[in-house]
Amino acid sequence: MGQEKKDRPDAGLRSLNHYRNALPTWRYWPREKLLPLVRYETPYLAWFQDKIRTPTLDSYFAFTANLGTHTFFMVFLPILFWCGYTSLGRGMVHILAFGVFFSGFIKDLLCLPRPLSPPLQRITMSGSAALEYGFPSTHSTNAVSVAVYAVALLNSPDCTVSPHLNIFLQAITYLYVVSIVIGRLYCGMHGFFDVIIGCLLGALIGIMQFVYGERFDEYLVSGNGKEVLIVVVIILTLVRIHPEPADDCPCFDDSVAFAGVLIGAEVAYWDFARSSISWTEPSPATVPYRLESLGWIKTILRTVLGVTCIVVWREVMKPSLLRVLPPIFRGLERVGLSLPRRFFTRASQYKTVPTHLKDHDVFPNISEIPSILTNIRHPRRRAVSIGPQSEADAYETLAYREKRRRESLSSPHGVRGSPATADHDSKTGLDGRAPTTNPRTPCRLDEYEHMMGTGTPNYSPIPMAVDVDKNARLSPVVPLDYSIDEPNETEMFSRIKKPRVRYDVEVVTKLIVYSGIAWIAIEGSPLLFDVVGLGLRQ
């Protein structure tokens, strides 16, 4: 037992080896080159957060973060199609699908962590921090791609919006994108590097859609079906080659959902263009709609009916597929055909899939809608999370702690950012003067750096996630007390949020369900509108 304990690596060494063992060299090498940048910017992010943080800004940025999620976009995108804005709706579907897919692709490829907490505090409206990797920021990608595409349309010669409305819409767009991007930094969810690359990716996607979107639509509509099949095969191939993450990260789930949306959207668009009720102006496969002809009552009824169809489809098909697919997957597994992805339980290892899964879905469950509306009505309801909240967070905390320990041992005088200098700096400061005692004065960068790798809050008593009401005061930031023992690896992983068990059948289920949602939004609902008397023929 003694020899076995001696040969067992300590927590820091295990955390350092985790990604080296889990990733191939061509993925591990760029991760190790970029990781120092993530660590370097963390103290500056903490300084920025503490410098400008107020309860009002907490509420504002926590609320506006919801406007950058794909859930927000996917709830409202169908309305664009039903109100005759097919070209705009398709453009939005494309840029969001590509943004979510490729940002998730890069996240799982490089497995870079979010900036460490502490010293950062993570501010959300959900009460729990995201389990995804940090690089790049999907919120920033979504927001910038939408903004670039919208501004390009507003500035195009074909824009029919009045000059005053044009200026107003552009101003709203700029305010929106700035709020999302700055909010990711303010809320402690991403670093400068994450949002910069996310913005660049979003800008590229928005420009590509504006330049080539119409050409792609013409290619798809003019074909005989072979073009649609090629597009579907390419999408499924991208899903198949999506990188395996080193940790249990839900990026792949979102990528699959939007792959399904894209498949359904392309098939529906191609088929609806051949329908007798579709209009060819202002773009092919346009849903017939004129407000002056239908009126507000029928417009509202169309929206309610369309949303109801989507909700019913999701609520019926998802549990049905989760019951039907496991026996099929077990049969495929017996002949050697199974989903070869980590962190997904194979059908042979379970009997049934639970009815109610805690999902990380694009569309919310019906049971989640009341809480979403409550958060919108009460934007001051937010959560402040301190400390690691995911496996990636925990591994990064342990790895940084080991790095700090080695640097301290290698230097007889200690190094900047190591515990060896913490006691001296906290008493005299780097300039030899006594530090200020004002609890609201931001810590120096060195003090923020000392907090990195602790894995515990540097102030107390604050639980890992607390609701902060409108009268709450921000907690003062004080120097870290190193007399408190840092948690070991076992304690660290016992505190983080555990991802739920995921099942192999969920991948195919998502593809079918979200393909169906897109088909209902683009073709199914318009056909139903025409049948029940809510349509409009040319």
Image (cartoon, rainbow, N blue to C red):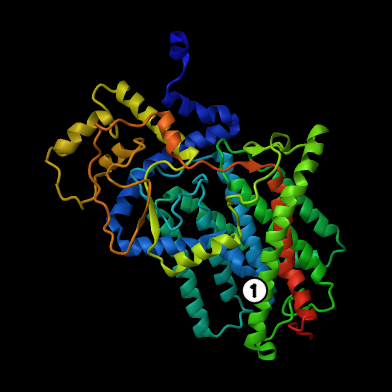
Say above or below: 65 vs 351. below
What residue do we see at 74% from left, 54% from top?
320
Q: Is residue 294 left or right of residue 441?
A: right
Q: Which residue lies furthest to the bottom in this view?
A: 292
Residue topped by disc 1:
80
Say above or below: 276 vs 12. below
Q: Classify residue 161 by image quadrant.
A: bottom right
Mark 1: which secondary structure?
helix
Q: Classify residue 310 by image quadrant.
A: bottom right
Looking at the rendering, in which quadrant would you find the C terminus? bottom right
Point out residue 299 in the picture as x, y percentages from the top left corner.
65, 82
Q: Residue furthest left?
A: 433
Say above or below: 26 vs 86. above
Q: Nearer the viewer, residue 477 or 298?
A: 298
Q: Visible in this render: residue 135?
A: yes
Q: Visible in this render: residue 235?
A: no
Of the residues shown, which amino acid type is indicated by label 1?
Leu
Point out residue 13 in the picture as x, y percentages from the top left corner.
44, 24
Say above or below: 530 vs 453. below
What residue do we see at 21% from left, 53% from top?
440
Q: Nearer the viewer, residue 405 or 32?
A: 405
How many marks on residues?
1
Q: Which of 82 and 484 is in front in this view?
A: 484
Q: Which of 114 and 32 is in front in this view?
A: 114
Point out residue 322 in the picture as x, y percentages from the top left corner.
72, 49
Point out residue 352 in the picture as x, y percentages from the top left corner.
70, 43
